[in-house]
Image (tube, helix red, strand yellow):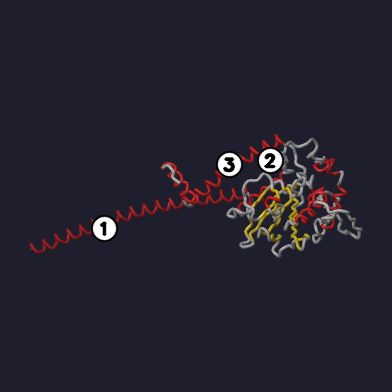
Amino acid sequence: MTMENELVERVDARVKRLGTTRSAFTRQALRNALRRLDEKELEERHVAGYRRDPAQPGEFEVPEADHAWGDDAWSADQSTVASTFAFPLPPCPPRPRDESWYFPMMKPRSRTGEAVVVAGAKPVQAATELPLSVIHAEALYRPVPPVEYDDEGYPGPDGNVPESTQHAHTSAYTFNSLRAVFRDRGDDLIAHDLMLLFEEGNRKATLAPDLMVVMGVGNEPRDSYKTWKEGKVPDLVIEVVSRSTWRKDVNVKPPLYEALGIAEFWLFDPLNPRLAGFELVRGRYREIAELPEGGLRSRVLALDLLVMDGELRCRDPRDAKVIPDHVETVRMLDVAERKLSQADHERAEADRQLAEADRELATSKREREQALRRVAELAALLRQARAES
């Protein structure tokens, strides 16, 4: 591959500034260019697919109950909230710290539709085996119009927006932090609000986790994640609870994630800050125990997740350092830049003083040499005067 001299000079200047090599910079630039081309092709496919196979009227209509918001809808169900989730609304009593977050409310079902016995209830038998999308129909995600569809008619990006600023901050932090941690692992996918499709031929079998991590499938741009094409389900899912979706997040989604075989499932409530993690053990979710130093260990991420000052944070167990969020990173960079600027100023002042000292030393040296020459001259005159006398 050949490049013009001007382009080579620009590349070399950027390489020097970044502290990398020309080959590494070129490889990354090519990857970025290919990624932009892929994204452009995906956008073109979105437009074509949406025109060719638009959503049928009412097919993805969002029920009002699933996205209820406001004081009336919220206060009307306070008794249910108090008994199941304990949001900080008086007179809701707090849950004991050792009580599982959602297990008392879970009613998981088998693949045949038989309900697992809960509190002595008699299971209901089903005549035939049912798909997970039927068994856990309440857990499915209903895309919010406008919805983009791919060439096969499966939904992709939609019009969903964050539920609250806390929800948006938490989702952004986890996504960006894990991308930073996994920056050199090109085979692992970190996805935020990506459509998760788990039954081929059924475009209603859709989930949209706030964040999911999938190892070994590559991190190329995607408009959705289809388990039958990718060859595996996600390794980890994080759901950030909101007032309009907490019922699904806490009661309905966990059994489906468990049935799909997702190794770790995490819940974070930003409104009443709390965190719970669950790992799959012999096909059932088991709550992850708290560490002695605080927080919960994720085997999938090899990180600790914890609540600090009401915010979800990730901690590297190797050095116990907490990964800062974007604002904290910018603040740290500002402090570092100020310190660097101060150090540069102090170094410049030290260089100036050193130069001044060198000049004074040079002047003193010249004056000493001149004085020695004058002494020598006087000594010579003295010897001559003595000789003449």
The spot of residue 343 in percent (x, y) is 48, 52
The answer to which of marks 1 and 2 sits earlier in the sequence is 2
* Viewer-closest of 163 and 340: 163
Cβ–Cβ below 8 Å for labels 3 and 1?
no
The spot of residue 40 in percent (x, y) is 60, 39
Q: Which mark is residue 49?
A: none
* Viewer-closest of 238 and 132: 132
Secondary structure, mark 3, is helix
Q: Which residue is mark 3?
A: 37
Q: In front of the other: label 1 or label 2?
A: 2
Outermost residue, left side: 388
| Quadrant (top left/top right/bottom left/bottom right) for the C terminus | bottom left
The spot of residue 262 in percent (x, y) is 73, 56
Secondary structure, mark 1, is helix
Q: In front of the other: label 3 or label 1?
A: 3
Say what amino acid the circle numbered 3 marks.
Leu
* Viewer-closest of 330 and 216: 216
Q: Which residue is mark 1?
A: 368
Q: How many marks?
A: 3
Say what amino acid the circle numbered 1 marks.
Arg
Q: Quadrant of residue 54?
A: top right
Q: CA distance from mark 1 to mark 2?
A: 91 Å
Say what amino acid the circle numbered 2 marks.
Asp
Q: In front of the other: label 3 or label 2?
A: 2
Q: Which residue is mark 2?
A: 151
